[in-house]
Image (cartoon, grey):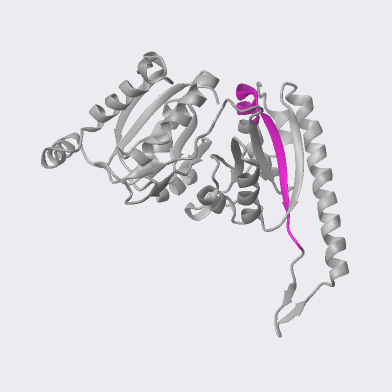
Amino acid sequence: MEGKIVVPLDGSPLAETAIPFAMELAKLTGAKLLLLRVCVFSVDLEENYVKEHPGEMMSLAYLEKVRAEVTNSARGLSLDPDRVEVKVCQGKFTYEIPEEAGVEGTGLIVMTTHGLGGFTRLLLGSVTQQVLRNSKIPVIVLRPELVKDQTEITAEPVSFQQTPLTIVVPLDGDPASEAALEPACWLAAKLKAKIKLLQVVSHVQPILLDEPVVEILYSAEDQTEDLRYRREAARHYLNQLKESLEAYWKNISFETEVITGKPAASLVKWSEKTRPTLMAIATHARGGVGHILLGSVADEVMRKSTCPVLMVHINKDYPGWRKATQLTQIVP
C-alpha cells in the first residue's frame, strides 16, 4: 500500500471534507497526496462553461488552489509542497478514479459518500459505489453530513492523537472476508494502532418450507443453545486467526470480540459506542453495491457508520489470510 493517497474532488465543500483525513494519513504513513478531478467535458467546453458561470473555476486552477491551502504551513496541519500533486483527467468518474489511481501507483483512495456541487456536479453517493465496484485499490469512505440549508457541513473529526488508535475488522468466518486484514494491518503498523477482530453472531432464524409454506420455529431452549454454540465457534475462529496474525505482525496488538444481533445494525451501533478510528471491511461489489459475506451489510455500514470505513474488494481467488501469508510476502 506504499505510494500515493488519492482524493477525488468535484469542487464541492462536501468532497473536500475528505482532505484533512487524507492529509493525516499521508503524514503518518509517508505517502504522497494526489488531488484528482475527473472532467466529463473537454477543456474547451469547460472553458465555455466557466465563462457562463463566473463562480466556477477551471479544474486545474481549482486543484492548484486546494493544493496551496493543503501546503500552507500557516494553517497548522500541512504537507510539504513536493508531497502534494494535482491531476485532471477526462472521462467517466466511476472508471477514471480507480483507473488513474492504479496508474499513479496508489495505495489508497479516500473519498466522501456524498458531494454535490461544482462544475462537474459529481454526486459521490452513487459514484462511491461504482468506484468500489471498479477499484482493486482499497477505498476509505467518509460520511459527512449536510445540515440546515445545505450550506453548513459537519464531519465527525477523526483524531489520530487518541491512544490507542483502533482499527476494527468485521469478519464472518469465511476466509474471503479476511481480505481486509492485509491493508488494515499495514495501516495499523503505520499508525501504531491496535486491531480488533470482530464477529457478529445472528440469532437462529426460522426455517421456511415451500408447498405448503411451513414455518419451523425453534424453542427458546434450542435458540439459547444454538446461540451459545455459534458464539463459541466464532470465538474459536477469531482466536485462531489472532494467533496467526500475532505470529506475522509482531508489532501490532490484536484483540477479539463477539457480539450478537443483526450484522449491519450491530456493526453501526458498536462503532457508535466504541468509536474506533477506522472500520476495515471486505466487500464484494456486485451490482454496484458492496456486499460482505455476512450478508448485504457493507453498503449499509458505509452509509450509516460515523467512523471512516475502509472498503477492500474481495478477490475471487483470495485464499484467506493464513494461506495468503504462505503465498505472498507482506512487509509490515
Quadrant of the rendered image containing residue 6: top left
Above or below: residue 132 compared with residue 64: below
Q: Position of residue 258 (x, y in %)?
A: 76, 47
Residue in the image at 62% along x and 27% along y: 186
Above or below: residue 31 compared with residue 14: above
Quadrant of the rendered image containing residue 212: bottom right
Residue range corresponding to the magenta coloring: 185-203
Quarter placement of the N terminus: top right
Residue in the image at 70% along x and 37% along y: 196
Q: Is residue 5 left or right of residue 268?
A: left
Above or below: residue 128 compared with residue 59: below
Quadrant of the rendered image containing residue 244: top right
Quarter placement of the C terminus: top right
- Among all residues in the image, which is located at the extreme bottom? 212
Residue in the image at 85% along x and 63% along y: 224
Q: Position of residue 238 (x, y in %)?
A: 78, 41
Between residues 300 and 138, which one lies in front from this camera angle?
300
Q: Is residue 290 magenta?
A: no
Q: Position of residue 46 (x, y in %)?
A: 18, 38
Above or below: residue 229 compared with residue 5: below
Q: Position of residue 95 (x, y in %)?
A: 39, 42
Q: Is residue 199 magenta?
A: yes
Residue 136 in view here = no
Residue 10 in view here = yes
- Among all residues in the image, which is located at the extreme front? 148
Between residues 145 and 236, which one lies in front from this camera angle?
145
Number of numbered labels in the structure image = 0
